[in-house]
Image (cartoon, grey):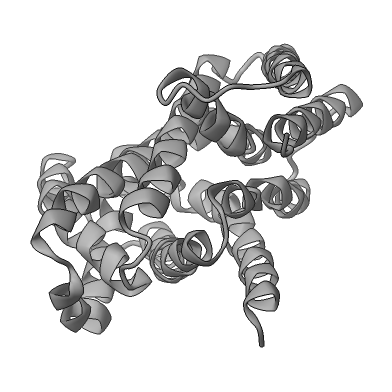
């Protein structure tokens, strides 16, 4: 399999895995609060990765550790918590559509932070992205008055972290083994995750009842596939392609998430689906080469 074929295989696998993560978060939240779920997910992923990837840490050079730290917290730690709190309050399919803003924000940060220029089509793409996001959130709030759509801002904030992460990996860690990067990330995140888990009351409140055991199963699946293996694949994808191509996984994830959400009884109006398409069109225009 050549590099071009591997890029597409990685993209499809990641779309399926991460697109399914939203419904898994929703199911895991039945037994755990968002803060507990997030800390437990990171802790479980860290333990699994350190078991299998500890020897890869020696590949990380001293000057690279600061970027390992930055990518750990911007690309995983904070987004994991943000999405858990969001899915607790809004439909998982909506959260997945908002995650489509990642390539959009990758470009936006390039313009604002790094001074990249942009053309007319990209400016139109920015406007379409903002319009689509506004419609999606406002319509969702109107259709679901029992849901707090202020929490829709959390996935949007998370996408800025993803955008910073993908650019840092490409610029500063492109020559480092993907497993080493992710194992280093979770080594950094393990201590604060354990502290959060302790203060969340998990160790004193976990009784092992049927609901908690079932939720724990979802957490393990999330940790193994949605966080551990997927993160390694994504980092490898960034290294063998471009930040824009890698972040385009968010085009496909909502299709998978909407499928699972519909099976679980979540409903999207035609206008919401249309706004999702508007967001993706905006992202396409923003990332289209000059």
Residue at the image position 46 percent from the left and 21 percent from the top: 115
In this image, 243 relative to 166: left or right?
A: right
In this image, 24 relative to 2: left or right?
A: left
Q: Residue furthest right?
A: 270
Q: Position of residue 127 (x, y in %)?
A: 72, 14
Q: Position of residue 73 (x, y in %)?
A: 27, 43
Residue at the image position 73 percent from the left and 34 percent from the top: 290
Q: Nearer the viewer, residue 261 or 95?
A: 95
Q: Position of residue 170 (x, y in %)?
A: 42, 53
Asked if one can make out residue 147 in the rendered structure from this viewpoint, the answer is: yes
Residue at the image position 18 percent from the left and 68 percent from the top: 60
- The tally of labels here is 0
Residue at the image position 71 percent from the left and 46 percent from the top: 251
Q: Residue furthest bottom?
A: 1
Q: Nearer the viewer, residue 212 or 128?
A: 128
Q: Nearer the viewer, residue 63 or 204?
A: 63
Is the N terminus in the top left, top right, bottom left or bottom right quadrant? bottom right
Q: Nearer the viewer, residue 72 or 275?
A: 72
In this image, 128 relative to 110: left or right?
A: right
């Amino acid at each position: 399999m050549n590099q071009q074929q591997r890029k597409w295989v990685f993209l499809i696998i990641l779309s399926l895995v991460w697109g399914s993560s939203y419904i898994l978060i929703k199911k895991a939240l039945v037994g755990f609060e968002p803060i507990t779920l997030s800390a437990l997910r990171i802790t479980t992923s860290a333990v699994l990765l350190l078991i299998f990837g500890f020897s890869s840490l020696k590949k990380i050079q001293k000057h690279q550790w600061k970027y390992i730290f930055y990518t750990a917290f911007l690309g995983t730690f904070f987004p994991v918590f943000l999405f858990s709190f969001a899915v607790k309050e809004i439909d998982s399919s909506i959260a997945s559509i908002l995650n489509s803003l990642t390539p959009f924000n990758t470009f936006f940060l390039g313009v604002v932070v790094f001074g990249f220029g942009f053309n007319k089509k990209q400016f139109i793409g920015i406007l379409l992205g903002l319009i689509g996001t506004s419609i999606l959130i406002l319509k969702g709030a109107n259709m679901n008055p029992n849901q707090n759509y202020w929490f829709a801002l959390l996935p949007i904030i998370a996408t800025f972290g993803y955008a910073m992460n993908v650019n840092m990996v490409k610029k500063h860690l492109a020559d480092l083994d993907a497993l080493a990067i992710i194992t280093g990330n979770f080594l950094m995140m393990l201590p604060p995750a354990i502290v959060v888990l302790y203060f969340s009351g998990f160790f004193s409140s976990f009784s092992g009842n049927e609901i908690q055991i079932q939720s724990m199963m979802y957490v393990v699946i999330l940790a193994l596939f949605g966080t551990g293996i997927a993160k390694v694949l994504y980092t490898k994808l960034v290294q063998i392609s471009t930040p824009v191509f890698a972040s385009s996984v968010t085009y496909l994830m909502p299709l998978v998430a909407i499928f699972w959400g519909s099976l679980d009884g979540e409903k999207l109006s035609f206008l919401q689906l249309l706004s999702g398409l508007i967001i993706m069109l905006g992202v396409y225009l923003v990332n289209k080469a000059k």
